[in-house]
Image (spheres, rainbow, N blue to C red):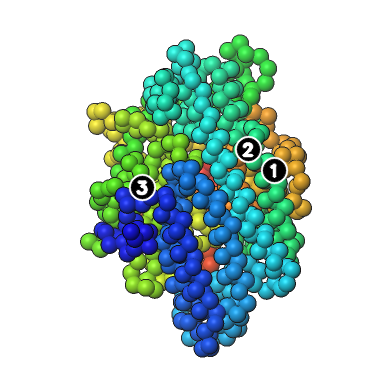
Amino acid sequence: MTNPLLADWTGPFALPPFAALKDEDFGPAFDAALAQARANIAAIAANPEAPSFANTIEAMERAEALLDRVSGVFYNLAGADSTPAREALMRDLAPKMAAFASEVTMNGPLYARIATLWDTRESLGLSPEQARVLELYHQMFVRSGAGLKGAAATRMAEIKERLAVLSTAFSQNLLADERDWFRPLAEADLEGLPEFVVAAARAAGEERGQPGPVLTLNRSLIVPFLQFSPRRELREIAYEAWVARGANGGASDNRANAAEILALREERAKLLGYANFAAYKLETEMAKSPDQVRALLMRVWAPAKAKAEADAAKLTQMMHADGINGDLEAWDWRYYSEKRRVAEHDFDEAALKPYLSLDAMIGAAFDTAQRLFGLEFRPLEGPFYHPDVRGWEVTRKGRHIAVFFGDYFARGSKRSGAWCSAMRSQSRLAGEVAPIVVNVCNFTKGAPALLSYDDARTLFHEFGHALHQMLSNVTYQFISGTSVARDFVELPSQLYEHWLEVPEVLERHARHYETGAPMPAALREKLLAASTYDQGFATVEYIASALVDLEFHDGPAPQDPMAKQAEILAAIGLPKAIRMRHATPHFAHVFSGDGYSAGYYSYMWSEVMDADAFAAFEETGDAFNPEVAQKLEEFILSAGGSRPADELYTAFRGKMPGVEALLRGRGLLEEA
């Protein structure tokens, strides 16, 4: 029988034939796709004709089409719905895919063709988009080691293969720790928990095959447990299990993996002539250098730490008033912070959730996109890759734009966190190719699913990434959608979060899941008034992680990353009751691939821009101003990587912003 991954996909919108896919299809499909890609690359490199943009760059754009198709399906499924077979194949594929990438970027004749085009670029009559694509291809080959010879070239290939193996192991170890840990909860352990937390614990118990409620390491369950449980000893057990992911000893321990990854990254950078990995990585980002990153983080660190320390003093007083002596601990912060929020803002998270059902927030995200960009969303019938997944066709004025999948609920087969990916990216080189975009979250399942405000922000954040993919309007896949500088990629997502705070969005969509009544104006005003509450804590835990990431890569690789982590945190004076948002053994952003390595700062770099970008709407007095929305689409959302990020932002806003808007948005400006 024909492998469904290799056959033409003739269904609606050329979607993958999910119902026909079997785990055993993927290995043979990758073998065939890799063989085809190798043959295509070899033909380009051996072409006797003089290099041209068409027979070299455009040919390369087409060369891996089948591999892109198979990879787009497999890696989405492997992250969102893993199985033992998929995990085994990921381990097998990691060195194979890395070896293939090295074969391409270190292919001497192929690089010679690209170098010839680069050297003669002024005479080629290229369009601006083509010139940019050529620039990025040349840059990719140079930075991948195309110019290395002999032993250096061989070692570079070995490093890439080993890094791929280690990154895959890091991710799978983390998933194993998250999947395997749970704690049964007796009825007495449910004391003080709102009904939505109890319901989530019971649902988690059902999923784990347990007779009663359980606590898991799913963020949407463990965070509200830490917020509301008065049982301090249980909070400590839960918190320590949460932060110990990847550091529990045994086969799933990630500490040795992290150390080896850091050492190999440093070696890779030095083979290419860079002082360290941070210098190599940041060269192509907006920040350009580690010093620029450090300057931004430390500019925000001082006021954030001062705010957090002032807050810690108040929370300690509250804890002592409860008869608990000693220091405020990390497992105490969320509990007493929630009590303080109720006391100071008369604002209770539990009272908010009935107005933030998942369906209502999906509707809010869609309606905002319709008002800003004219997009419309029509539900699609499955089956998709999992029964929980929902699908929509995205259109504008009757024209098909994209297919959007939402995979919102936590499950044991899904890695933690939230992300956006594309099973297929937009391009026009081989005709109009519309994207298939996926948002994956880890919300607690319910009937209905009720979100925290933080969950709702996550939904809007990931949908901002999805818009970057769906509205892409370029010819070449290489620069499509989110193929931009890492410290620019978070701009659309963080910008989109701002619309969740627009009063008319809440008024229209934040409605009680049972009665349909709108969120009371008083509750909405309390929510918005408390929007900067506890930002000292949130900013400190984030910057601590970003600085550890930066220092790990800006200098000699530490032989003992945990000791280096402790040294960095001591040097900046991390408050005792706050820990890093992501400690090294579970810092997937940094160690599950190179994406955010030396780049976790990029959320804050982008936040400087997103605060300023939303101000462009606020200055008109209309959060849905059509002229500003049109400029946002033209210069940011549709442009992909067609121009350098600073050029795109300046074209949208007129100039690059300063850090003041970020500080103001986090409620930190007065301490600056």
**Are the residues flagged by discs 1 and 3 in contact, CB closer than 8 Å?**
no
Q: Quadrant of residue 207?
A: top left
Decide which of tag 3 and tag 2 comes sooner along the chain. 2
The residue pinned by badge 2 equals: 251
Residue 396's x, y, as percent? Answer: 27, 60
| Residue 467 visible (yes or no) | no
Residue 409's x, y, as percent? Answer: 39, 38
The residue furthest left is 398
Callout 2, which amino acid?
Answer: Ala
Decide which of tag 1 and tag 2 comes sooner along the chain. 2
At a point 35% along the width and 66% down the height, the residue shown is 433
Element marked by disc 3: loop
| Residue 12 visible (yes or no) | yes
Element marked by disc 1: helix
Residue 237's x, y, as percent? Answer: 59, 22
**Viewer-nearest of discs 1 and 2:** 2
The residue pinned by badge 1 equals: 256
Front residue of 62/190: it is: 62
The crowd level at tag 1 (other Cα within 10 Å; few <14, some 14-19, many 20+) is: some
**Are the residues flagged by discs 3 and 2 in contact, CB closer than 8 Å?**
no
Please state, as top left, top right, bottom left or bottom right, where the C terminus lies in the image.
Answer: top right
At a point 45% along the width and 58% down the height, the residue shown is 28
Decide which of tag 1 and tag 3 comes sooner along the chain. 1
> How far is disc 1 from disc 2 in space, using C-alphas?
11 Å
At a point 68% along the width and 41% down the height, the residue shown is 255
> How far is disc 3 from disc 2 in space, using C-alphas?
30 Å
Marker count (numbered)? 3
